[in-house]
Amino acid sequence: MTAPAPALCPREKEVTITIDPSGSIKVVPDTFHVSKGRHEEVVWTCNVPFTLDFVDSPFHDTHFDNQDTYSGLVRRDVPAGTGKSFKYSVSAGRHHVDPDGQVDQ
């Protein structure tokens, strides 16, 4: 029997990636928001293997996947609350989608 997934702590912001039977990818929320001041981080969850890449990442890493799902904290040199959009691409199989994220105060 598989153990249930551990509950997220308040500073972990979940972004759920799902793949429907036709292969379409859906990311919820489409735009994530993490608070730099509250030391929040993103946790990506998905029902199949995936890869995720930022061109300009607010985090120390630019690549995440089903093995590395936690973003870590926002880099110190990233200003908070500017409304800047951090685009990233999610791929699963032959399909991809391009959501974004923002760093709040």
Image (cartoon, helix red, strand yellow):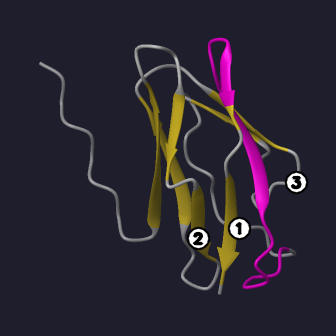
Image marks 2 and 1: residues in contact by CB distance under 8 Å: yes
Q: Comparing marks 2 and 1, which lies closer to the viewer? A: 2
Q: Is residue 71 visible?
A: yes
Which residue is more in the foreground, 30 or 38?
30
| Screen quadrant of the C terminus | bottom right
| Screen quadrant of the N terminus | top left
Query: Image point 62% across, 12% down: which residue?
Result: 93
Left or right? Give the position of 43 relative to 8.
right
Which residue is more in the foreground, 81 or 69?
81
The first of marks 1 and 3 along the sequence is 3
Q: Specify start and end residues of the magenta stretch as a single range.
A: 78-96
Image marks 2 and 3: residues in contact by CB distance under 8 Å: no
- Estimate the spatial distance between the alpha carbons at disc 1 and disc 3, rounded to whole Å: 12 Å
Which amino acid type is shown beneath numbered disc 1?
Val
Circle 3 sits in a helix, a strand or a loop, which is it?
Answer: loop
The first of marks 2 and 1 along the sequence is 2
Residue linked to disc 3? 56
Residue extending furthest toward the left: 1
Left or right? Give the position of 23 relative to 10.
right
Q: Is residue 9 magenta?
A: no
Query: Image point 78% across, 59% down: which residue?
Result: 86
Q: Comparing marks 1 and 3, which lies closer to the viewer? A: 3
Which amino acid type is shown beneath numbered disc 2?
Val
Left or right? Give the position of 30 relative to 80.
left
Residue linked to disc 1? 74
- Estimate the spatial distance between the alpha carbons at disc 2 and disc 1, rounded to whole Å: 8 Å
Circle 2 sits in a helix, a strand or a loop, which is it?
Answer: strand
Query: What's the mark number on residue 34?
Result: 2
- Residue 83 x, y percent position in the rendering: 76, 78
Query: What's the mark number on residue 2?
Result: none
Left or right? Give the position of 27 relative to 61.
left
